[in-house]
Image (spheres, grey):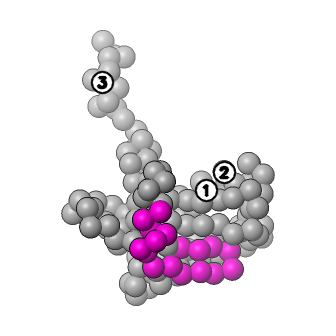
Amino acid sequence: MPGSPSEQLAATPPAATARRARISRSRDFDAVYRRGRSAAGRHLVVYAFRPDDADPGEPARLGLSVSRKVGGAVERNRLKRVLRELFVSLDPPAPPETDIVVIARAGSAEYLAERGSAALGARLGELVAKATGSTA
């Protein structure tokens, strides 16, 4: 039967797997804010924390905080989508077993519209490297 649950699980798209690499619980955000290191720029703030209970080899997890000060729902959702794509394509990538929270400040949607995702990705890469203590 092609629609059986076991076949649906076997054909899970990669996007569903990527969802696991997200921070979604409030206590995880709180831990990163309280115990993590931060780096800030004009449009983004990045917090990074390596939890003690992380599984070895687990990819870095991303949490996003985009308030209504950034813009309406369409702008916020577009910015979150772009930030997720940029995070996955970071070069060098974020260190494994690290929780990273990105806070978008007011004006970041306009920055994205004016300068494009490449410029925002460069800022994101710099801030992630600074917050994690790695060299970029």
- Helix, strand or loop at mark 3: helix
| In the displayed structure image, the side of residue 67 where residue 37 appears, left or right | left
Which quadrant is home to the C terminus?
bottom left
- Rounded to the nearest angstrom, the CA distance separating label 3 from label 2 is 31 Å
- The residue lying at 36 percent from left, 35 percent from top is 12
Residue 40 on the magenta span: yes
Which residue is identified by label 3?
7
- What residue would you read off at disc 2? 77
Magenta stretch contains residue 51 = no
Is 26 placed above or below 132 here? above
> At label 3, which amino acid type do we have?
Glu
Residue 117 in percent (x, y) is at 64, 67
Does dot 2 land on a helix, a strand or a loop?
helix
Instruction: Point out the residue furthest to the bottom here.
Output: 135
In the rendering, which numbered label is found on residue 80? 1
Q: Is residue 90 visible?
A: no
Residue, far left: 56
In the rendered image, the quadrant that contains the N terminus is top left
Graded by Cα atoms within 10 Å as few (under 14), some (14 to 19) or many (20 or more), the crowding at tag 1 reads some
Q: Nearer the viewer, mark 3 or mark 1?
A: 1
Asked if residue 103 is positioned above or below residue 74 in the image, the reply reads below
Q: Disc 1 to disc 2, how far (Cα)?
A: 5 Å
Q: Position of residue 84 (x, y in %)?
A: 53, 58
Nearest the viewer among 118 and 79 is: 79
Q: Which region shows up in magenta? A: 30-46
As drawn, is 6 to the left or to the right of 111? left
- Residues at circles 1 and 2 in contact by the CB criterion of under 8 Å: yes
- Please rate how many residues cluster around mark 3, counting C-alpha atoms within 10 Å: few if below 14, some from 14 to 19, many from 20: few
Tell which tag, 3 or 2, sits nearer the viewer: 2
Residue 36 image point, x, y percent: 43, 74
